[in-house]
Image: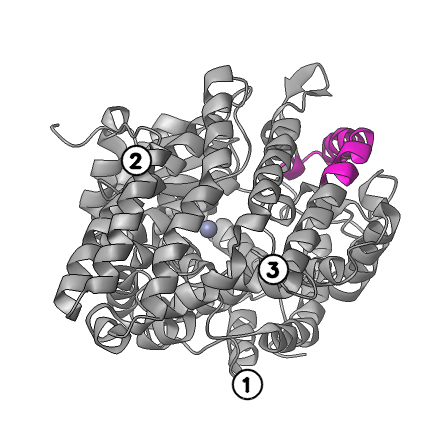
Amino acid sequence: MGSLQFSEIEQAAPEMDQLRDQYSRFREELQSAQDEATAVEVMHRWDALRREHSCWVSLTHLRFHQDTTNAEYKQAREQCDQLTPQLTELDISIKRLLVNHPLRDKIETRIGAQAFALWEAEIPTYEPIIEEDMVKQSTLSARYIELLAAASLELRGETLNLSGIAKYAESPDRELRHEAQLVRCSWFEENQDQLDEIFDNLVSLRHGMAGKLGFDNYVELGYLLMQRVDYDQDDVARYRQSVKELVTPLGVELRKWQAAELGIDKVMAWDLAVFFPEGNPLPEGDHDWMIEQAKEMFDEMGGGLDSFFHLLSDGGFMDLKTREGKAGGGFCTSFETVGMPFIYANFNGTRGDVEVFTHEMGHAFQCYMSRKQPWVDYLWPTYESCEIHSMGLEFLTWPHMEKFFGERAEQFRRIHLAGALLFLPYGVAVDHFQHLVYAQPNASAAERHAIWQELEREYLPWMDWGDLPHGSNGGRWQSQRHIYLSPFYYIDYTLAQTCALQFWLRARQDSQQAMDDYVALCRRGGEAPFGELASSAGLVSPFQEGCLRDVVEQARQALPALPASS
Ligand SMILES: [Zn+2]
């Protein structure tokens, strides 16, 4: 083999005293730099340190997710949470200096305008006055992760975690689906006080930080933290509105089609994930088999996906099986010192495994393709652009789905497309919820649940929770991790989905072209803002008038069960 092994990657925690001296030397050198070449040379040394810090944060968080019950990992994560604000402060001290540097224009010509745009967004988001609050925020986030990871659910004699029970949402047996949802929702109801308390503390903390930094509320601060440098709240509000007008009615039709397909009167909350009376198609093998199929698939797709997947797989840069104590969810993280990403997931034997896997693989591939970007700021783009790589690859792998689903691959594609469309109203509802919550930071827990209920009626009018607890009281948002852990990280998925659907449409006409454009986009990493990255890949911005309408209309035509136009 000889390829780099994940187990060989080590990164010690930074020595803060030493680091402070180092940073003050950087500042002195930058201040006295007489030409941009000297400044850029200093910046490269600073960049190397930032890669080490980022790598350390990634490793620490990854290990904690892999085993939330391991005391050593937990302690390391706590140390990381303690030090992260101090690292942010040190980096901001350099960014502030560079933004105001007499040689800024010349430096900008060398390194690109995007880094400066990102730094200008970041500078107002941190002052030492919020250091303690940042640490508290991390502690609360960890509490949420641990609480969910520790869920132990009993279903017909089987003990399951939240990832494990999710597979029953796709069972062909309606009674079993209902029972599984009942168990799941009951767990959330039993833990609702804790979930409310954690969130309430998070909202007060975030609102308080916004106030200390001079913002009216957390919304504006949240946008800056998400580094949204080329669109604003008004653009997002207009986009949400267009989803409500164009996609929600389509969602209603899709749910009717689904009910007809299932032979039931109405799709209830426990039916949402299943589309065929015999159950959804399942991958025809276990984890190891899936990896073998994936190897074949990426070998056929080429474009660099082939050799990259071998590196990932041979080097152990994946943890995909679910197990006790392992935190839920799926994500991709990276080790900037060596230019390798890592894929994390919780396989549960459903089609979702293939979706999560191709999704995270898209992130990983982009991260790998842009590893030669000279600045750490450009290794990843901002999130709405990141999600184009992941959701785009979900669609680009379509022609290969026979490898996982055999004769039922076409059913998989249909569910995937319907799911992609149905996701849009849910995604904007999650975004809208957060805008409303942070605009009214003193709302009670009950008021927040009422807000969610109202949004559900507005964007997802087909939702019917029946006799299920928690969900029927507006509690669904409490299982959406981003709302707790990554505020305002959600509209990104819907914007990216609108772009990914364009890749899908292009691939249907010219798969090679779509693949080439995709690889070129990945290579650019984060060297430009969202709008520019999208247009360079020939994608119409979701903010552009008519974009969503075109995309949705073409998707509708591909779903034969639906009439061509409403
Ligand atoms: Zn993603």
Amino acid bearing label 2: Gln
Contact (Cβ within 8 Å) of mark 2 with mark 3 = no
Residue at the (18%, 32%) spot, across then down: 4
- Decide whether residue 146 is among the magenta residues: no
Secondary structure state at the residue bearing disc 2: helix
Secondary structure state at the residue bearing disc 1: loop
Label for residue 18? 2
Residue designated by label 3: 213
- Decide whether residue 172 is among the magenta residues: yes
Image location (x, y in percent) of residue 421: 58, 63
Comparing marks 2 and 3, which lies closer to the viewer?
Answer: 2
Which is more N-terminal, label 3 or label 2?
A: 2
Secondary structure state at the residue bearing disc 3: loop
Above/below status of 498 relative to 143: below
Disc 2 to disc 3, C-alpha distance: 28 Å
Label for residue 545? 1
Q: Which residues are magenta?
A: 169-198
Q: Would residue 103 be visible to someone looking at this image? A: yes
Above/below status of 296 relative to 213: above
Comparing marks 1 and 2, which lies closer to the viewer?
Answer: 2
Disc 1 to disc 2, C-alpha distance: 53 Å
Amino acid bearing label 1: Glu
